[in-house]
């Protein structure tokens, strides 16, 4: 009878797996932050008239950017 095993430390939940999980988390957080900043920047470039046409005001921009990035 043959057995196959994966003996790398990531499969055992060792320190390597924790570092990899941390790096994945950091990358995800940075990607969300970039999305927030990009969304806010694009909305902020709109004129007051364009925002009014969309039914928005300048005070809504941070909330909308936050929702776009973090409330997916």
Image (cartoon, helix red, strand yellow):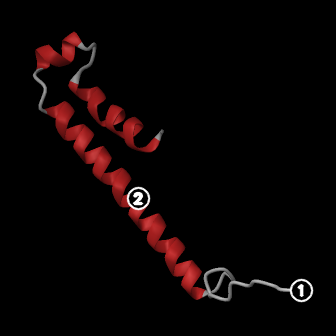
Residue 2: image location, x then y, percent: 83, 86
Who's the residue at 28% across and 52% down the image? 34
Horizontal side of 30 relative to 72 (left or right) equals left
On screen, residue 59 versus residue 8, left or right, reads left
The crowd level at tag 2 (other Cα within 10 Å; few <14, some 14-19, many 20+) is some
**Disc 1: which residue:** 1
Q: Position of residue 44 (x, y in %)?
A: 16, 33
For residue 40, what is the image quadrant? top left
Which residue is situated farthest in the right direction here?
Answer: 1
Q: Is residue 22 left or right of residue 9?
A: left
Q: What residue do we see at 61% from left, 81% from top?
A: 10
Question: Which residue in the structure is indicated by mark 2?
Answer: 29
Query: Is residue 13 positioned above or below 52 on the image?
Result: below
The image shows residue 55 at horizontal and vertical percentages of: 28, 13
Number of marks present in the image shown: 2
Asked if labels 1 and 2 touch by Cβ distance under 8 angstroms, the answer is no
Label 2 or label 1, whichever lies nearer to me, is 1
Q: Of marks 2 and 1, which one's residue comes earlier in the chain?
A: 1
Q: Quadrant of residue 8?
A: bottom right
Q: Depth check: give the residue in front, 54 or 2.
A: 2
**Vertical position of residue 18 compared to residue 27: above or below:** below
| Crowd rating for badge 1 (residues with CA inside 10 Å; few <14, some 14–19, many 20+) | few
Q: Residue at x 50, y 76 (%)?
A: 20
């Amino acid at each position: 009878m043959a057995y196959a095993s994966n003996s790398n430390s990531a499969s055992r939940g060792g320190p390597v797996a924790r570092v990899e999980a941390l790096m994945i988390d950091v990358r995800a957080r940075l990607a969300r932050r970039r999305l927030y900043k990009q969304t806010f920047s694009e909305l902020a470039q709109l004129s007051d008239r364009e925002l009014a046409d969309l039914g928005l005001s300048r005070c809504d921009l941070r909330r909308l950017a936050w929702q776009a990035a973090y409330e997916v």
